[in-house]
Amino acid sequence: MEPGSRETILEVRGVSKRFPGVQALAEVDLSLAAGEVLALVGENGAGKSTLIKILAGALRPDAGEVRLYGCRSELASPAEARRRGIAVMYQEFSLVPALSVAANIFLGRETSAVGVIAQRGEWRRARELLEQLGAANIDPRTPCRALSTAQQQLVEIAKALATDARLLVMDEPTAALSPAESERLLAIARGLRARGLGILFVSHRLEEVLQVADRVMVLRDGRLVAMRPRGEVDREWLIEAMVGRRLEQEFPRRAVAVGEPRLVVRDLRRGKRVCGVTFSIRRGEVLGLTGLVGAGRSETARLICGADRRDGGTIEVDGRPVELRSPRDGLRAGIALLPEDRKSQGLVLSHSVRHNFSLPNLPRLSRAGWIVRRRERCELEHWLSAAHVRIAAAEQPAGQLSGGNQQKLLLARWLAARCQVLLFDEPTRGVDVAAKFEIYQLINNLAAAGKAVLLISSELPEVMGMCDRILVMQAGRIRGELVAAEATQEQIMRLAVG
Amino acid sequence: MRSWQVVHRGLALLAVDYGMSLVLLVVAVGFSVATLQEQPADGPEGGRQLARLLARRYPTGGRVVVVARETQADAAFAQALADGLAGSPIEVAAEVRGRPAELRHVLERLSAAPERIDALAVHPAVARWPLLQELPGEFPSLRHVEVLVPRSHVWPSFLKADNLLNIANQIAVIAIMAVGMTMVVIAGGIDLSVGSLMALAAVVATRLIRDLAGAEQAGAWQMAACCVAAMAICGLMGLFSGMITTFAGIPAFIATLAMMLVASGLAYMTAEGESIYELPEVFVWLGRGADLAGIPNAVVLMLLLYAAAQVLMTRTVAGRYIYAVGGNREAARLAGVPVERVTVLVYVACGVLAGLGGVVMASQLKSGAPTYGQMYELYVIAAVVVGGTSLSGGEGQMIGTLLGALLIAVIQNGMNLTGVESYQQKVVLGSVILAAVLIDRWKRRLWQRV
Ligand SMILES: Nc1ncnc2c1ncn2[C@@H]1O[C@H](COP(=O)(O)OP(=O)(O)OP(=O)(O)O)[C@@H](O)[C@H]1O
Ligand SMILES: [Mg+2]
């Protein structure tokens, strides 16, 4: 499908945006035709989400113009962008959890008779839309909070289709999905392209970029550094364009002698989500925990750190059984959790980088309840640079950081926490290739320091490349244990499906 | 960027950083201009002014006669004048307090005496007596005597020292209670029971003093113990509110609404439906005394509390925890913050401070009654919100609350001075609160957009 032969939907010319302390976008141009998929890649903080927010009408550019269907348009608000046929799926979801699927799909555009919403009609139309997406199993009447991440995403797309959008913009739509679910989402995207929609999407997963994009554009430090058709790009080229240098290997090597068991978990159970999980992690070992979304991996991690109460089972750290009633107890016992959803569980978005960094470390950074500010500043500087977090200022609200930098900030906080056992739940979600490598190195350093690391991840290459052993979970149980060096993706998938 | 955007952003930044102080300043200047008027120098102020005038006039010494009427204001005038002259080389030859006839009597005596009189220092009302006009004619020997009168001047009534102290006194109680409320709101909660708690504390403290500490004969320590006991009871009520919101998961709004009714009922029961007046004189020390350079003790207490709370919120682990709990409860919990304990403790602190407010109020009024504190919870919450603390938690500053309380008090006081009806005052106050909340929302949107 050659672009240019079709109608151009979107044209962006010389768009710039500056935030205090950083030039998020500098004179970016792009064009997108009907029936074309354009992938947008770049490092964390390169300005991808900023560009998307401008297209969505949520941000105004300092300079430059956005042209839709050939004429210049001021996108003054998200509502206006939606009216002009741009549907946007943000990096974070914008569904209302308590409302039903149908209500969310038609939110703000309810068809009503004398103010009373015509519910039956909405349900029927919602069902039609979901069927088009191959998601007939989602009942339009269920509240959105009861849906899985992947299902919520489909609802987001249905919401976009309900507006008769011509242009679908997606910011890291697959970041929170398992490989199979991503596969399905991409298939849907292809179907929409065939129907003539223009699609712009952001992803840190280069495989899928190479799979579905017609063209790829690369941003670095807010500048457009390359724009090429798919035929002319490969993985190495992409990485080099994004990072500005070659990346020799994807997973750093680790040569650590594995020692005594550090964390021993026996017969852990809670309801139907976790049914008798038993494993141990040794000093200096990285244990992978993988499986499909909903297999009970995050729940297991939450039980181990004390975030949820367990129905049964024992947890030992360095041979001593620990009693956990809250994450605070977990932290005292030397167990830290990097939660999977950084926005709702990890950060206080409106608070500064400094406060977010210090929060779990305050007992150490204080004397008799008084914060020792010099010590706080020192540690902050040290660990932010150790974790390669890019910030404009320590007093900047954490919510202003790009997604990947938020993740690295959380990592920095736990690196500083001096815990013996680290539970990392999807630590590289939404993180660019170069930063991933840095995170892997940090994990290796932790292992080298004799810590026990549990790495929960849906990305098989990651678990295979980073871990010593791999546990595969399915329906709340451990289905098998593999030695990473000998495991294959097929083996893992077979265990994961059950 | 278009120019309106620049203006919009500039205004918003001002609103964030200096907004409240700016608004306060504007309001204060407005009321100053509106209340600009002739200030007769007939009180202590006039006495002091006259003393300064005399000292300048007779630097090497002189003999004066002080003349004033028998009213209270005149007494204060004469007293201030005497105080002002004490220690200066000027000698008061006589002090006349009374009617023209008495002055005539004294002047007759003085004109006969050999010592020379330099001046008559008179109250402005005295200056209008016909006798003084005819002085040179009636007493030729006193022809060279000057008559000195303090001059009236133009000054805003709003900015008179008395009025400013008045404002400070008015806000002390609300501002003290608002310290606790700010903590609760920053931690993501709300406490509707503070008004009732303050009545309860006032009644319990006064009743304990009456029944256990010996009523009018109560000693200072006994009274202090009674007040502390009353505050402790309020703390317990706060503990209870905190426990039911955190552990039973009942919304703070409902839990503290119930507590408000309970506490109010308890206050009426404790007071047996009446006011309690049987208190020693010294009980008013806290509410009416002014031991530090003329600043009322209640105001000193309030300022100390704000300083302490500001330090607590910004420099200590506890303060960080309070902000974190309000900012994102789940994230705070996962980061090892003892979320439950923090929540309960802020309600306890709020209860104790509401109790302290009640004690101060009882001391100001020298009585305890269960009717105290009605609607106070709303004023306190208004002070917190006007001060920029967000009701959704996680954001806010102690200093903002103090400014908020000050703004509300200044507006009330200014409207009283300019003769605005009390019903109209309510409308204005309500609008101010609304405006403050709108500014807050605006700030928030801007934070997201820019
Ligand atoms: N509201 C804001 N205020 C200040 N700076 C901001 C704001 N939003 C974004 N930034 C900064 O702009 C830069 C670009 O951010 P953006 O979110 O567009 O990155 P991104 O390419 O989407 O990164 P990621 O892959 O991590 O999601 C970052 O340095 C970020 O810190
Ligand atoms: Mg982004």
Image: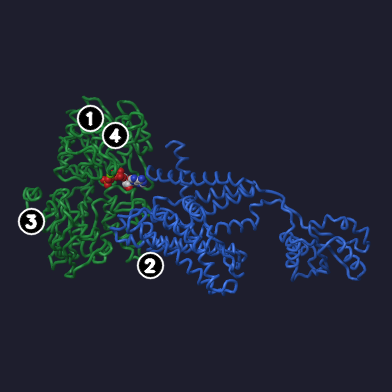
Chain colours: A green, B blue
Locate the N terminus of chain A and report the quarter of the image it occupies: top left
What label does residue B247 carry, if any?
none
Q: Distance between the residues labelled 3 and 1?
A: 43 Å
2 and 3 marks on the same chain: yes
Secondary structure beneath label 1 = loop
**Both labels 4 and 1 in a single chain:** yes
Left/right placement of residue B25 relative to residue B76 reads: left
Disc 4, disc 3: CB below 8 Å?
A: no
Residue A199 x, y percent position in the rendering: 23, 34
Give the SS element for disc 4: loop
* N-term-proximal mark, 2 vs 3: 2
Q: In this view, does A17 lie to the left or right of B117?
A: left
Q: Mark 2 points at which residue?
A: A369
**Label 4 or label 1, whichever comes before in sequence order:** 4
Residue A197's tag is: 1
First of labels 3, 1 by sequence position: 1
Query: In this rendering, which labeled residue sits more in front, label 4 or label 1?
Result: 4
User: How busy is the neighbourhood of tag 2: few (under 14 within 10 Å), some, or many (20 plus)?
Assistant: some
